[in-house]
Image (cartoon, grey):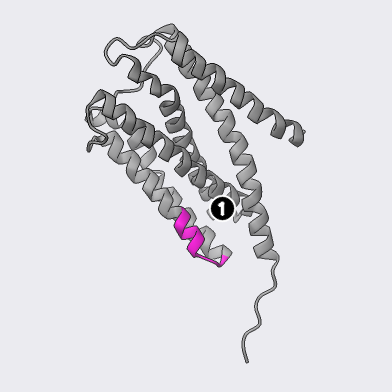
Amino acid sequence: MKRAIDFGLPLLAIAGIVVGEIMGLWIAPAERHMGDVYRIIYVHVPAAWVALLSFLIAAAASFTFLFKTSWAADALAEAAGELGVLFGTVAYILGAIWGKGTWGVWWTPDPKLTAMAILVFGFAGYIALRNLTEEPERRAAWSAVVAIILAAGIPIVWFAVRWWGGLHQNQSTRDSMNVFMGATLGINVLAFTLLFVWFLRMRYRVAKAKIDEELSEPPEQELA
């Protein structure tokens, strides 16, 4: 079953991305205000969604570790945190390209952009903390607290436009999008989510194997 999932997930994800991008480039109509530059949302939005999902999973797994001392949860938090930074960086770079074409600048201190930057850089620090802390129990506990604190930024990113406005567009709804735009975006979001699940499974196994190896090592002998 695991082998079938590991084989099927990436195939479904890649097929979905190919179909979604073909629809985004050639089938979905141009946006009436932004023209063709808006088409970058078909990668930008799914990447941003997956990044926030990753950070949420990292925080939930960290919470589980603190209350149950589950090393599987610690490994899941590590894997999700790293993938969140990866997809968050992709979303931010694509957002900068979109911003240059739409607003005329690569970046502006917009509330949503600033909140997302803090979240991505914060989890980059989370990764650094894990890499710099050798003792497994201490590393897991400290990084879990950091991940939970950083997770407070997720709703801020999600609702930033609604709360404070800014240049960034608000989340689109079914009524505000052309049917082909909505279908294209939905396919890409689903495909990116499947790709993320596959990445998460692979990265989790690596993290769990490393933790198991660390916990099985005998303590070093003190020098006489």
Examine the rendering and report whether any part of residue 79 can be seen.
yes
Is 158 a magenta residue?
Answer: no
Query: In this picture, is 6 found above or below 213?
Result: above
Secondary structure at badge 1 equals helix
Q: Which residue position holds label 1? A: 65
Q: Residues within 10 Å of mark 1 (few under 14, many from 20)?
A: many
Q: Residue at x 45, y 44 (%)?
A: 85
Residue at horizontal 25 percent and vertical 30 percent from the top: 163
Residue 151 in the image, given as x and y percentages of width and height: 41, 44
> In the rendered view, would you say 132 is above or below 62?
below
- Considering the image in quadrants, where does the C terminus appear? bottom right
Residue 59 screen position, x and y as percent: 48, 45
Amino acid beneath label 1? Phe
Magenta segment boundaries in residue numbering: 127-135
Instruction: Please name whichever residue, 82 or 157, is drawn nearer the observer in this view of the structure.
Output: 82
**Residue 182 in view of the camera:** no
Q: Residue at x 66, y 47 (%)?
A: 205
The structure residue drawn at horizontal position 38% and vertical position 11%, both measured from the top left corner, is 177
Residue 102: % across, % down? 26, 23
User: Who is closer to the viewer here, 146 or 12?
Assistant: 12
Which quadrant would residue 37 be assigned to in this image? top left
